[in-house]
Image (cartoon, helix red, strand yellow):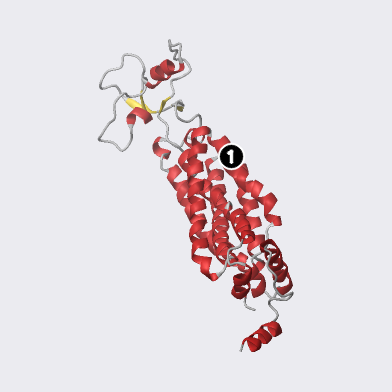
Amino acid sequence: MKLDDVLARIGEFSPYQLWVYHWYCMLAFSVAFHHLGQVFLGGASDHWCAPPDTLTTNCTTLDECQLQNSSFSVPVDDEDTARNEHNCMQYVSYFNVTEDAPLEECTNGYEFDHSQYTNTIQEDFTLVCKHKRSAALAQSVYFFGLLVGSIFFGSVADRIGRKPTLIICAVLQSSLGLITAFVQSFAAYVCLRFLIATASMGIYLITFVFATELVGLKWRNVAGNVVPIYWGLGIMLLAFLGYLVRDWRKLQIVLSVPTAVAVIYMPFLPESVRWLLSQGEVAKAEAIIHRAARASKVTIPEHPFDEKLEVNIIISIH
C-alpha cells in the first residue's frame, strides 16, 4: 500500500499524529522569539551626555538626578542637522552657558533612562547617535541568516533526515542564544545573531515540511496552515516575556531556554515516515506506522508497504 492509503486506514490525523505534530510545532515558539526578540533586546531608551565626574549634582531621587544630568546636554533639537543634539551633544562648558555657547559631542559617554528598560544592547554597545543605525544592521544580518539557513538546512534535511537536522538546529539555536547573552562586543552579537538565524530558519522550514508529511492528504493544508499559528502564539508570549524581563541579557537567556528543553524531548519523537520511505528505510517506517496504529486501536498488515501485498490487494479488489 501507499503511505496515503495506510494513513487513511489508521486515521489521516489520528491522536498519535496530533501528539507528534504538536510537539514538533512547539519549536515554532522559539523561532518567533528570536525573529522578533530584538524589538525588546534593542528597545530604544532616552539618553543624554553623561556629566563629567568633577561635576556634582544636588539631588535626592533617581528621577531628579537624571533630570539634572540630562539638563547639561543641549536642551533643544537642531532641525538643521541630522543629529538629535539634545541626546548627542553637550556644551563645551557647563558654566556661563549662553544661547550661542559652543557645542561638542559627548565626551564622557552617555546616561540612559531606565524607566522602561533596565538594560538594552543600545546601552551596552553604545548604539546611539552616530552608531544608532547599527542596531538595524544587526537585524538585517539576521534576516540574511534566514536566507542562508533555508538553503543550507533544507539540503541537510533531505540528506540526513528531518529529525536529526531539527535536533542540530535546536542545539545550535539554544546554545548560541545562551552565548549571546554574555557577549561583550557588538561584532560578536551580530555574528551570533546571524548563526541563530540560520538555525531558526532550519527549525521553521523543517517543522513545516514535517507537519505536512505527517498527515494524510485530506489534512495536509490544515496541518501546514496551523504551523504559523504556533508562530503567532510565540509572538504573543514574546510580548509578555518582554514586559516581565527588562534586561536584554536576561531576556536573551529566557528566550533560549525553551529550545534547550525541546532538545531533551525531540529524540523521543519519530522521524518522518515519508522521508524514511524515500530513503528505502521501510522497516523503520513500518515501526512508526504500527505505533500509530496501536495508538488508534487499528489493525494493519504486518508489512503495509510490501509491494507484493499491494499487488495482491489490488488483484483481490478487482
Seen in the picture, residue 310 relative to 194 is either above or below; the reply is: below
Tell me what residue is drawn at x 48 percent, y 46 percent.
235
Pick the front one: 159 or 308: 308
Q: Quadrant of residue 311?
A: bottom right
Quadrant where the N terminus is found in the figure = bottom right
Q: Position of residue 312 (x, y in %)?
A: 68, 86
Q: Quadrant of the C terminus?
A: bottom right
Observer-nearest residue: 34 or 60? 34
Q: Is residue 239 above or below residue 20?
A: above
Examine the rendered structure and indicate whether residue 309 appears above or below residue 70. below
Q: Quadrant of residue 294?
A: bottom right
Q: Residue at x 60, y 75 (%)?
A: 5
Q: Is residue 203 left or right of residue 77?
A: right
State the residue position of label 1: 254
Where, by quadrant of the figure, is residue 56 drawn?
A: top left
Q: Please tell me which residue is depicted at 60% across the width and 58% down the height of the picture.
A: 18
Q: Say which residue appears at 68% left-offset and 61% top-offset.
A: 295
Amino acid type assigned to the residue bearing label 1 in the image: Val
